[in-house]
Amino acid sequence: MSAAPPVIEVRTSPHLHSGRSVNSIMRNVVYALLPLCAYSVWLFGLSALAVLAMSTACCLLTEHLICRLSGRETTVGDWSVVITGLLLGLTLPPGFPLWMVAAGSFIAVAPGKMLFGGLGFNAFNPALVGRAFLQAAFPVAITAYTPALALHRFSELIPSTLAIPLIKAGPLAGWIARVRVDTFSGATPLMLRKFDHVTTDSWTLFLGARAGSAGETSALLILLCGAYLVARKMMDWRITAAMLGGAALTASLFHLADPVRYPGPVFVLLSGGLVLGATFMATDPVASPVTPLGMWIYGALMGLITVVIRFEGGLAEGVMYAILLGNALSPLIDNVTQPRIYGARSREAAR
């Protein structure tokens, strides 16, 4: 009896597996975000903790319910929705009303992620989709920042945190009166520079003891957390480097043209949410290019757009819109930066 012929199994690439699962990668991103969450709670107290808990819980609940209603197994166990919840909370003011946080969390997950098909199919960063909705729907509340390191931050909530839905929140004067106003101001460094022409000290920006969104304050801590993911080969550093480099170059050109009107590149890099966005949002592997050249173009373009919006737009910040525009252009960038097929002389020859 003759032996059975050998079976040749034909599969598509990739043929080698790194051994890392989606769950383990997402879980490590959560680990990298936890120090930022802890620092935001240290700076802003119970209100920051409440915002982070609400955004994460509502994102988890929304994804779970959508999966159940569509007859699928829940996908909350892959940790990706936890990242969405934490990132959304970190981009919001620490005193943001919790009912608004819940609304933004629903938008981030339902149309921002699940409408596209879930993890791996979203065209835009879901957390920024939620924040963009909140920016449009509640423009006053999302720019109502409070000072850092308030004396009673661990015993009292910022009054606006528990504001009743659709009712204007009460004034913060009583709470702010107990804050060390001689050292810290509720206005963010970007607001102070754009509207009052006051520049914040670079070391304060770098270390992070200042007003701002819950997770954007310390550039040093954000970069250290990003370095953890880079060291574990779970994040590509090119996008972050390109976005920061593009912003620095654009800011330098503006500053050289008019140093009185435009701040220098150091202030631009360390203020606002640029470092947070470049490290944890622009690098979303689903919504960003996959080619090395495409990553450099994508990051540099977002850095340029961020500075142009900050300097010439009506808003103090431009990172969110820059990344969303970058997400929209990502497929085009990937298409025009595809490497030449081996043996083909040109793109036309490859066809």
Image: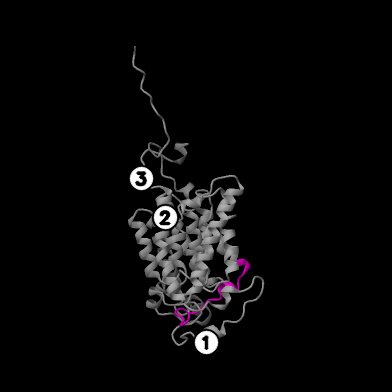
As helix, strand or loop, the secondary structure at mark 2 comes to helix
329 with respect to 35 (left or right): right
Residue 309 in picture, x, y percent from top left: 53, 68
In the rendering, at what x and y percent does residue 226 appear? Answer: 38, 61
Residue under numbered circle 1: 177
The secondary structure that most of the magenta stretch takes on is loop
In front: 166, or 271? Answer: 166
Residue in the image at 60% along x and 71% along y: 139
The residue that appears at 41% across and 42% down in the rendered structure is 340
Q: Circle 1: is it few (<14), some (14-19), or many (20+) Cα within 10 Å?
A: few
| Name of the residue lying farthest toward the front | 155
Marks 1/2 in contact by CB < 8 Å: the verdict is no
Gap between marks 1 and 3, in whole Å?
54 Å
Q: Amino acid at mark 1?
A: Ala
Residue stretch in magenta: 135-152
**Which element type, helix, strand or loop, lies under badge 3?**
loop
The quadrant in which residue 16 appears is top left
Q: Is residue 106 magenta?
A: no
Instruction: Answer above or below: position of 255 versus 286.
Output: below
Q: Which residue is mark 2?
A: 27
Decide which of tag 1 and tag 2 comes sooner along the chain.
Answer: 2
**Amino acid type, label 2:** Arg
Amino acid under disc 3: Gly
The residues bearing labels 3 and 2 have C-alpha atoms spaced at a distance of 15 Å
Mark 3 crowdedness (10 Å alpha carbons): few <14, some 14-19, many ≥20: few
Check the image and name the residue furthest to the right.
Answer: 166
Q: Residue at x 54, y 52 (%)?
A: 123
